[in-house]
Image: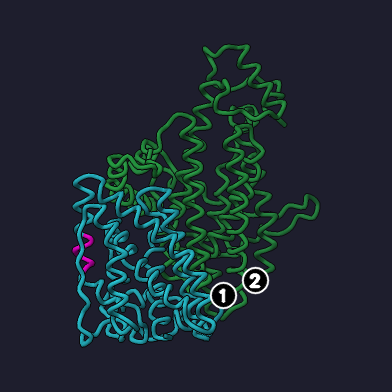
Chain colours: A cyan, B green
Amino acid sequence: MSNDVLALADDKLMLGHTQSDWTGLGPILEEDIASSAMAQDDLSHATVLYEALGEDPDALAFGRAAADYRCCDLVTVPDELDWAMATVRRFICAHFATIVLEDLAKGEGDIPERASRLLIEQRLQTEHLDAWIRRLGRGGDDAKGRMQHAFDTLAPHAGMLFEAIDNRADRHARWCAAIASPIADAGLTMHTDLPDESVHGGRRGAHADHFVEQHAEMTQVWAEDPTAAW
Amino acid sequence: MSGAANPVQPLCPCEGEDPDKLAEFEQRITDGVHIEPGDWMPEAYRMGMLGMAEHHANSEIIGALPEGEWITRAPSLRRKLALTAKVQDEVGHGQMLYRVSQELGKSRDDMLRDLITGKTKYHNCFNYPAPTWGDIAMIQWLIDGAAIMNQKTLADGAYGPYVRTMNRINMEEAFHFKSGEDMVLTLMSGTRKQKKMTQEAFDRWWSVSLMFFGPHDKPDAEQRPAMRWRMKIERNDSLRQRFVNRFAPAAKDLGFTINVCEKDDRGFVTSVREDEQCVLDTDTGNWGFTDPDWNEFFRVIRGNGPCNAHRLDLRRFSYEQGRWVRNAIAKGGTTTPPAA
């Protein structure tokens, strides 16, 4: 259970990190604001989950070596400020987070209350992102092409969301069912198999270079003096 | 003092306007009645308010850029969240102010295009670099502090939609200022390295803050349309003095040295000397200060500042990379707010 909590918290941290970088640069002011609100949700969710692990959230967020993070590769694949990539990534990850939080909300101890609280915001995210997948998929040939390209680019990374987590086959099936309807409505396609467990990725510390680079940037100021107050 | 009460004739291009309607319009301003979008107004007033609101909106969304660049490097979860929320607020202010401008007759897309082609301007202070985390503290403390001081007077203006927007913006700006104050306090109570970084950032932003309020006023500022019609409420020099009276003693209390600095073309300080004029005049109650370099101000406003090209390039990139999204929404006929 705590492995799942740390994996989801690290996903949320890096999703919030990558998506907050869009603040001020979104394609439409109203969606810029909404996107930034979701980035803030993710950073806050990471904080709540780190606290659930009984650790200092800042020490976990900034004070670990890159190999000790348990986020999947998908959350730090560079989007090159391409809104299609950013939207599809968020959509894929939001549905994954919803499923994990639904399971965590049924558990025992301190976690369920926290997970239930996060789930309210998480469902708003998935609703918002489902609408945008449909909207952009149906928004003409140019938009449809860009969105399909984003799905094709990110699909190979999506299966690794389920690396080294509990009930992976069941959760993968539920996730596939959850994303199927918006994707089909949008006239788009995505297929992701569950990777073999022998394949190591970010959830077991085997991070891609893009994560290591973003980790260095994220911790740059903090690392100048980890004992200082900022 | 209201502009309409001033006996001096207006210096405004009102030829061709109905004199009775103009008199009624000016009387409403004298009486403190808000002008609303559907009301009669001289064309010069409409154009003046449009220019002012559009410039303000442009400043908000360009102002999001220097701080936005530091979101990915914010050194704690709390600071990262606060900075993201703060920059998000600036985008929201831009959105509200573009709505005010749209009602005055210009589409949002036209305004965004005029911004990225350099046809319209934004506030000069965002053409300076923010090379350290200390600069982010300075923007939130000094620049937002200056903005609040200015915008509180603008909330006493005559154009209803702009006044109501100022009131909303000022509430959020007060949070930004608190955040900046907390950052400055934390850094100036921190390690020697943090204090040095923060003093260097203060040196970069003090003169920019003094320039924030604009150049010295014309002697007849009150008779000119901007103040006569309560688009602008207080003289630049009066606002600047109030700013210095508020922030010079606060800076000294926090341990800053107020310096007069020379800068290179990149906006980096090349030499400093303590500003000996920065003392309290007990007779007037005013703090003295060395005037900023107005040649630098006009050089930057003409597009030759340290970061003018970089800020506009990024804004242009954002506009162009988002075009397909706006087109898709237009084609899909959805209810999402359109770009224009």
In the displayed structure, would residue A14 be above or below residue B326? below
B25 or A3, nearer to the observer = A3
Q: What is the chain letter for disc 1?
A: B
Is residue A166 located in the magenta-colored stretch of the structure? Answer: no
A113 or A40, nearer to the observer = A113
B112 or A42, nearer to the observer = A42
Q: Residue at x 22, y 68 (%)?
A: A155
Give the structural element (helix, strand or loop) at label 1: helix
Q: Name the residue under label 2.
A: B255
Q: Name the residue under label 1.
A: B195
Q: Residue at x 29, y 63 (%)?
A: A179
Residue B16 visible to the viewer: yes
Left or right: A170 with respect to B337?
left
Write down the quadrant of residue A21 in the picture. Answer: bottom left
Residue B220 visible to the viewer: no
**Residue A228, horizontal then vertical, whole percent:** 54, 82
Left or right: B76 with respect to B337?
right
Residues drawn in magenta: A150-155
**Residue A83, horizontal then vertical, whole percent:** 30, 56
Residue kind at label 1, given as amino acid type: Lys
**Residue B47, horizontal then vertical, whole percent:** 49, 28
Residue kind at label 2, given as amino acid type: Gly
Q: In which quarter of the image is the C terminus of chain B?
A: top left
In the displayed structure, would residue B43 be above or below residue A81? above
